[in-house]
Amino acid sequence: MIQLTTKHLLTIRDLTAQEVLGLIERARQLKAGWRGGYRPTPLAGKSVAMIFEKPSTRTRVSFEVGVFQLGGKALFIASRDSQISRSEPLRDTARVLSRYVDGIVVRTFGHEVVEDLARFGDVPVINALTDRYHPCQVLGDLQTVAEYKGEVRDQVYAWIGDGNNMAHSWIEAAAVLGLRLRLACPEGYDPDPEIVAQARARGADILLTREPDEAASGATVINTDVWASMGQEDEAKGRAEAFGGFTVDGRLMSLAAREAIVLHCLPAHRGEEISDEVMEGPQSAIWDEAENRLHMQKAIMEALLGPRP
Ligand code: CP
Ligand code: NVA
């Protein structure tokens, strides 16, 4: 297992470059190990509460299975079935859950909610997506890049689409690891300028453009996400118009490096942000990317919730 200095994982900014690389390495070991019969149980006797205020397939299942494989017990708490839906303050929920469980995984809207849980609870909190960040996904994506490409820092990353939670976590990864990242977003859908400025202040090589072709040209990792995220369903029609020309399709891929891979955190809308041809094509690393959520989150939980040497 690797050592992390942070108690919580709320954003990629919480980690150092060495810690990110260590998590990638450990996730790969756990992945190979599980298949080969190496099955450590650092969460034996431990419980993890999973509070979800938004839908999920991958994150929910990969965390629940991950806790199980590490020897612990996961408790899924849909906010609508708990007193959170009846306005019990999060700080009270955090303090009470800390008396029962050893860690809290949370998916919610406002990022301040996960910060509150971390501030008022006593146990580690892991961000399973907020409107602002999706750190576990981007860490799993980096593991996927490492598997396909070797060195994650030698790549040219292109983000095509919305300057959303995923884009923000990629920008932070660029800052922490010193990645080259080109983001093509339509006007009005840029990433938060403060997150970009903070990353640039740390020396991140970030290009913002309105031209998907410019971002994709020569890139070795092409990444996209839905045009309307969870909670933005009412904006879907307007967004579909604004994002015209931002589809990752065969034409755009022809501009990328010959060996480029394509990532999408899923769920995807084929024909919108990505074509069916690219999703199903030989450059798609999307299914391995989805699998790696399990292995990366096991590495994260082992480090944050397992026994400290
Ligand atoms: N990529 C991802 O977080 O998927 P879910 O919304 O299904 O968890
Ligand atoms: N940006 C998307 C990611 C889904 C995993 C959303 O927030 O809905």
Image (spheres, grey):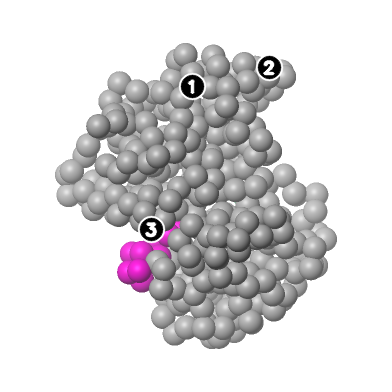
Above or below residue 50? Residue 27 is: below
Nearest the viewer among 143 and 85 is 143
Work out how far the residue at label 2 is from the one at label 1, CA to CA, in angstroms. 18 Å
Three-letter amino acid code of the residue under disc 1: Asp
Left-right relation of 219 to 53? left
> If you read the primary sequence from the N terminus, does the residue marked by circle 3 or circle 1 appear first?
1
Residue at disc 3, secondary structure? helix
Q: Secondary structure at mark 1?
A: loop
Quadrant where the image shows the C terminus: top left
Q: Which residues are magenta?
A: 141-151
Which mark is on residue 122?
A: 1
Q: Amino acid at mark 3?
A: Gln
Which residue is labeled 3 in the image? 143
Query: Residue 72's spot in the image, x, y percent?
Result: 33, 27
Q: Main secondary structure of the magenta part?
A: helix
Residue drawn at x 63%, y 20% as measured from the top left: 91
217 or 254, nearer to the observer = 217
Neighbours of disc 3 within 10 Å: few (<14), some (14-19), many (20+): many
Residue at figure coordinates x 72%, y 63% from the top left: 190
Kindly indicate the quadrant of the structure image that contains residue 186: bottom right
**Disc 2 from disc 3: Cα separation:** 38 Å
Residue 219 percent across, percent down from the top left: 51, 78
Is residue 250 visible to us here? no
Pointers 3 and 1 in contact (CB under 8 A)? no
| Vertical side of 188 occupied by 6: above or below | above
Q: Quadrant of the N terminus?
A: top left
The amino acid type found where label 2 is placed reads Glu
Which comes before the other along the chain, label 2 or label 1? Answer: 2
